[in-house]
């Protein structure tokens, strides 16, 4: 399995396939993280299970990263607890 970092100008999957001169799109997996595109070339069908597990792990990291940096979560965690006046 080969993990290759690709610059931001390759935004479409077809451009990445043309860049690598690959005709088979099933052997190519891409994902985005922080405005950068990562590409995984699968040399064998044996690695597809590893690629699926890696993409699920990456999506969990991305969700937790967005939750920590999101304005809603930042503001709610820093709010003080106000008591009602009687």
Image: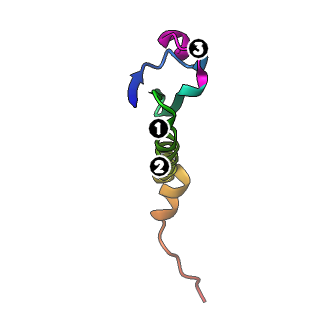
Numbered disc 3: secondary structure: loop
According to the image, label 3 marks what residue? 23
Q: Nearer the viewer, mark 1 or mark 2?
A: 1
Q: Which residue is mark 2?
A: 57
In three-dimensional space, the C-alpha distance between marks 1 and 3, rounded to whole angstroms, equals: 19 Å
Highlighted magenta segment, given as a residue range: 16-25
Q: Quadrant of residue 26?
A: top right
Between 35 and 37, the one nearer to me in the picture: 37
Label 1, secondary structure: give it. Answer: helix
Q: Residue at x 51, y 53 (%)?
A: 67
Left or right, 54 with reference to 23: left
Residue 81 belongs to the span the image colors magenta: no
Q: Nearer the viewer, mark 3 or mark 2?
A: 3
Q: Residues within 10 Å of mark 1 (few under 14, many from 20)?
A: few
Q: Earlier in the sequence, mark 1 or mark 3?
A: 3
One can see residue 71 in this view: yes
Element at badge 2? helix
What kind of secondary structure does the magenta stretch mostly adopt?
helix
Q: Which mark is residue 34?
A: none
Residue carrying label 1: 47
- Residue 34 vs 60, above or below: the answer is above
Q: Residues within 10 Å of mark 2 (few under 14, many from 20)?
A: few
Q: Position of residue 64 (x, y in %)?
A: 48, 53
């Amino acid at each position: 399995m080969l993990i290759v970092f690709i610059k931001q100008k390759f935004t479409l999957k077809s451009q990445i396939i043309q860049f690598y001169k690959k005709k088979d799109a099933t052997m190519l997996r891409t994902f985005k993280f922080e405005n950068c595109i990562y590409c995984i070339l699968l040399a064998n069908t044996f690695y597809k299970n590893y690629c699926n597990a890696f993409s699920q792990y990456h999506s969990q990291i991305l969700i937790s990263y967005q939750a920590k940096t999101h304005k809603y979560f930042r503001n709610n965690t820093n709010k003080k607890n106000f008591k009602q006046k009687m």
